[in-house]
Amino acid sequence: MKYKLTLLTFGLLLLIHPIDVTNAFELTPGSGYLKASRKITCSLEDNKPIVYWWYGSMYSRVQGEKDRLLFKVEGMNIRQCATIEDPKRGQGYRMVSRELLFYQDPDTGEILDQWTNPWTGETVDVLHVANDPVNWGNQYEINRNGKPYEMNLSIHGDDWWDTSTIPLFYKNPLAGDFQDYVGGIYHATEMFNTTGSVADLTDDNKDTAKVNIGWERISYWLPWMKMSGRNGIVYFHTFGKKLNSYDELPESIKAEIETNYPIYNQPPPTSDDRKNETSWTYFKKMLGNN
């Protein structure tokens, strides 16, 4: 009788709290975290295009004056991953991508061709960010230090998130040969918040994970603003997500890509071994084309 009562009670519990039979993997160092990293970054399926999209604002900060909203901004990154293997470090993946960021009128959202600098009064051509490529180094089950691959995920219930702060400090690509003596070092900080659902991330029935992103950046004036070393910085504050497909991008962005940046509707090939582009190296390249 006790045995039958136990079965009956268990059956009732199943009706009230059904067991989740989703095929899930564990977030553990090594293969588990590597799989999670790849699902966040791109897809477990080789050569599958994945698109991230974000939008927000760019402000100025100058000592002694109020911050100014200079632009709305909207960007996208299109990427894909490929499986790789190493005899010592195990299975891994590499990611290749290219990305765009457009500067928009702060009132209308229209993508700008020119901008009148409020500090100098000069009207300058706007150079949007068009970085090709933006690739990652190879990621493996075993790190360079011989330990299993790990992620810095914070998990609370079904929520996971990752917070990354990336200080940048290196010789400015536009600088000369004596910058250690006279300055000209590029100084910026990139800040990312990436979030999602643990159940979605660890679901083995899905090749990619749903992801929300926050991107912030602090840097010197943009080179095309022609600020001539004036005091001040700019900062970006944006939010976005991984899209289900390229078609979900706003129509204005897709039209701009079709007209002026046609290669950005596909990621680079996974064999791409070019050096990464930055907004500064891209600006230098555009100067050389003038």
Image (cartoon, rainbow, N blue to C red):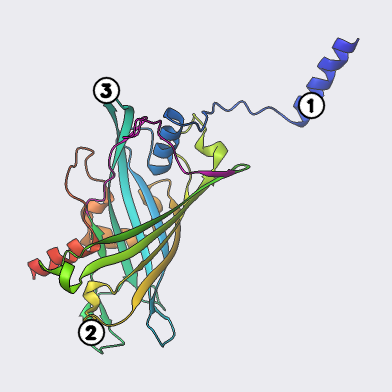
Near mark 1 (Cα within 10 A), the count class, few <14, some 14-19 or many ≥20, is few
- Give me the residue at 47% from left, 47% from top: 211
Q: Secondary structure at mark 3?
A: loop
First in sequence, mark 1 or 3: give its number: 1
Kind of residue indicated by mark 3: Pro
First in sequence, mark 2 or 3: give its number: 3
Whole-percent x and y of residue 14?
A: 75, 25
- Give the image quarter of residue 207: top left
Q: Secondary structure at mark 1?
A: helix
CA–CA distance in space, label 2 to label 3: 56 Å
Q: If the image is split into quadrants, where does the N terminus sit? A: top right
| Mark 1, residue position | 13
Q: Which mark is residue 87?
A: 3
Residue 118 is one of the magenta-drawn residues: no
- Give me the residue at 27% from left, 26% from top: 86
| Mark 2, residue position | 123
Extent of the magenta region: 132-155
Whole-percent x and y of residue 128?
A: 26, 67
- Give the image quarter of residue 123: bottom left
